[in-house]
Image (tube, coloured by chain):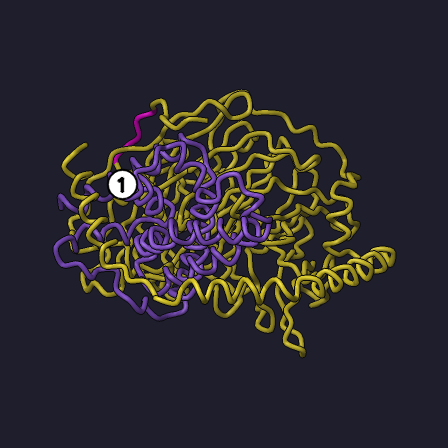
Amino acid sequence: MSALESRLKDALTAKAATTTLSPDARDRIEQRVGRSAKPRASRRSFALAAAMLAVVGTLAAVSTVGELRDDPAPTALPRISPQPPNRDAPMVGLRMKGACDSLLCDAGVVAAANYLMPDRPESVLLQGRFQDVSIVGGEYWALADRPSQVIRLADGKPQLVEDFKNDRVRSAPIELSDGRLVVTTSVVLADGTTTFDLVIHDRSTGARQPLLRDENRLSNPVIGPGGQIGVIQSIGDDASVFRTFTAAGTDLAVVRLPERRNGYSEVRVSWSRLGLLAISGNLVGWDHDASTSIVDPVSGREVHHIDEWMGQAWSPDGTALLLARPAAKGRRTELATATGSALRNSSSITASARRSTTTSCRCFGSHRNDDPYRLRVRAGRSTSALTLLARRSTAFSSSSIRAWSVRICSPTISAPPSTVRITSAIPAEARYGI
Amino acid sequence: MDQTGTAEHATGDLFSRAYAPMVRLAHLITGSNAIAEELVQDAFVAVLPRISQLTNPHAYLRMTVVNRCRSWGRRQRLEQRQASPADESFVDDVGHAELVDALAGLPTRQRAAVVLRYYEDLSEAEIADALGCRPGTVKSLLSRGLASLREVVER
């Protein structure tokens, strides 16, 4: 046992020794057990009544969770033939267009998702406070978290596209080929309950075509390789389904996603050209412990699971998946690609990083997701992607793999946020087991 | 002994054997004595009615406690996003303050793995059971947790 481990043992023992116990704990537990035992029968009756009502509701052919659970896979979705990737491919990147201006440049959290293949020699200085960013047609759409504005960044200039000020937009919108936006929103009704909507929003007329309204959370709209609209619908603490629709609003399919014991938060979804979904998230309750499921959206079957890595983006041909995770040492991010049959081959593209010179930065304890930081990306002639992963930011360049990592500072620290540049990457075998 | 008597005996036995260790465990994971007691009592309330069906009530109770600590951690995170810092500082032991403070900074799952390993002395397989993951993941959690702690301590 190392010195650190011995010290740790001592520290834990000392800390545990400070624990005090209530003298009446047993009485309180027994009282509560007694109380909770009694109403059980009436609860059962209530549950039975509720179940009967649910059956009636299902017969009324309303899209409800009960219906989904009874019939999890009415698969009318055209088969996309998902195939396991089998060769290396260039990674998908995010096109960056110059520096953003002050509207978007107030320090804050930046998150980016849904990458495009970059091909323009641009550099970027992007700072801002967004809940999510989605990329459409060579530009990117930024969704500010408050108020709910959809902003198009064109040539580094933000343009307000839509303001969902009366809705709470939960995930980055996606844009259909005809320019309409697909948005998930939550609406608080007069009785105080919240409903979640998946709607197609026509910017020119303001008209909304509802695709789904449900009391369960809807999030992460995504467009499939065949133009389908997909969305994740929670159906409980640990369970969710993936629903697909046509742009005309036809309900195509509902498939139950593989259940992770603790559920996900901060979910990312990416639909590859080959038809596979990469669904990543932090395991709920475990802070930033990432996990990625590769799922066949037709059957809901999990093709592969990658622990401790967040799937960030598919390559344009759908054969490779970019993965990222916080590095074990230091406040850096490791990057890797997963390729080959069922994505089992992995290559690390992580580079070594110089430590921040601002040693007073500490990222844990009082750290919160909205802590300010500064992210500077200089990609030379290549374009880059940004993402927020586990409170760290990563940028990568698709042509000459370079990565940057940013140390996120606690707001209580007065030292300026620091930027750490990671030098060029050295491909190597990743050491994680999949 | 009739069935009721057996259940009562098992309940009493589980309480006397497990209550204090579980509160200590939850205290180390959450950093709060009061929260720890609350969570462990909740866990007992959930487990006791089923005790006769459990092959290993102690392990099941531990898993329940760890899960409740996890849920509490999740709520804390959400609340911290809203505003206020935690009521009780994790650091109340001056002699080991730095290490204990560093432990508090670990992601909840890493922290739980470290506590289960170095306080409870559980094997990787047992930790995997408690955390609901694979032994390989436990290895990784411990390695990453120790690396982070080492970095802080050696800073």
Q: Is residue A367 above or below residue B50?
A: below
Where residue A138 appears, x then y in whole percent? 53, 46
Q: Nearer the viewer, residue B45 or B96?
A: B45
Q: Quadrant of residue A331?
A: top left
x%, y% of residue B110? 34, 44
Q: Nearer the viewer, residue A49 or A88?
A: A49
Helix, strand or loop for disc 1: helix
What residue is shown with label 1? Answer: B118
Vertical position of residue B62 compared to residue A428: above or below: below
Q: Residue at x 23, y 59 (%)?
A: A18
- Residue A305, compared with residue A63, is above or below; it is above
Magenta span main SS = loop
Work out whether residue A267 or residue A79 is closer to the camera in this orientation and state it: A267
Provide residue A263's location: percent of width, then percent of height: 53, 48
Residue A192 image offset from top left, x and y in percent: 63, 76
- Tell me which chain appears purple: B
Residue A54 falls inside the magenta stretch: no
The quadrant where residue A100 appears: bottom left
Type of amino acid under label 1:
Tyr
Chain of the residue where label 1 is placed in the rendered structure: B
Q: Residue at 30% of width from left, 26% of height from top?
A: A426
Question: Who's the residue at 29% across and 35% down the image?
Answer: B143
Residue stretch in magenta = A423-427
Question: For residue A169, what is the image quadrant?
Answer: bottom right
